């Protein structure tokens, strides 16, 4: 597998991200959905990676620069048929390494607070993320869990 910076111009990643947004809309109340659409992910403060297994797109993730020292993880997703196969761990390790290389000293994220998101929260805990108060423009939300870690 390889992890590549993606310019989000291809139809495969567009479809993959649309599936992500649709899944989040089906699980999370609209006012609590924070998944970014394709256009929002193309902003200059975002670096986006795709995980490729040969020619197959199997995962993705991004970081959004919040300020000079703080970035947010966005759009972490593994192809449903490949969940629990190590892709998310491989990608998260890559994101943490790249965030350090880019000079960030803190990495934070918002994920769901329901049972559906438990595997994601466990993954982030495994990588040293701890629960925290809302950050950036987030407000307290019973459907959201906020996590952070120093780099």
Image: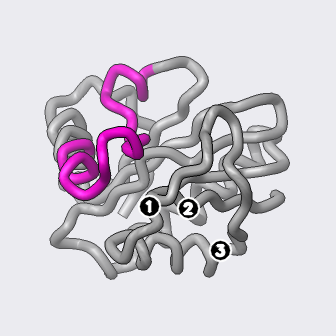
Determine the residue positioned at 55% across, 18% down.
44
Vertically, is 63 above or below 59? above
Is residue 70 on the magenta stretch?
no
**Badges 3 and 2: C-beta atoms under 8 Å apart?**
no
Q: Nearer the viewer, mark 3 or mark 2?
A: 2
Task: State the SS at label 2.
Answer: strand
The quarter of the picture where the C terminus appears is bottom right
Estimate how packed mark 1 is, as few (under 14), some (14 to 19) or many (20 or more) residues with alpha carbons within 10 Å.
many
Q: Main secondary structure of the magenta part?
A: helix
Vertically, is 99 above or below 80? above
The quarter of the picture where the N terminus appears is bottom left
Q: Which of marks 3 and 1 is in front?
A: 1
Q: Distance between the residues labelled 3 and 1?
A: 17 Å
Residue 104, numbered circle = none
Vertically, is 146 above or below 69? below
- Magenta segment range? 21-42
Lateral position of residue 83 relative to residue 22, left or right: right
Estimate how packed mark 3 is, as few (under 14), some (14 to 19) or many (20 or more) residues with alpha carbons within 10 Å.
some
Q: Distance between the residues labelled 2 and 1?
A: 6 Å
Q: Which residue occupies the foreground of this view, 104 or 136?
A: 136
Residue 127, numbered circle = 3
Determine the residue positioned at 54% across, 30% down.
46
Q: Distance between the residues labelled 3 and 2?
A: 16 Å
Q: Which residue occupies the foreground of this view, 22 or 41?
A: 22
**Which is more N-terminal, label 1 or label 2?**
1
Which quadrant would residue 51 be assigned to in this image? bottom left
Which quadrant would residue 82 be assigned to in this image? bottom left
Task: Residue under label 1, please give it.
Answer: 112
Can residue 63 be seen?
Answer: yes
Lateral position of residue 25 relative to residue 63, left or right: left
Task: Residue under label 2, please give it.
Answer: 145
């Amino acid at each position: 597998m390889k992890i590549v910076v993606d310019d989000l111009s291809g139809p495969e990643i567009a479809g993959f991200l649309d599936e992500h947004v649709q899944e989040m809309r089906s699980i999370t109340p609209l006012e609590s959905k924070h998944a970014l659409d394709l256009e929002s992910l193309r902003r200059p403060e975002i670096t986006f990676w795709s995980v490729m297994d040969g020619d197959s797109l199997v995962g993705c993730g991004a970081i959004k620069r919040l300020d000079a020292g703080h970035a947010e993880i966005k759009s972490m997703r593994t192809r449903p048929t490949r969940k629990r196969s190590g892709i998310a761990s491989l990608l998260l390790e890559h994101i943490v390494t790249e965030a350090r290389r880019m000079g960030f000293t803190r990495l934070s994220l918002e994920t769901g607070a329901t049972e559906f998101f438990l595997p994601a929260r466990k993954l982030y805990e495994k990588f040293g993320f701890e629960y925290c108060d809302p950050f950036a423009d987030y407000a307290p939300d019973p459907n959201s869990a906020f996590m952070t870690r120093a780099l």
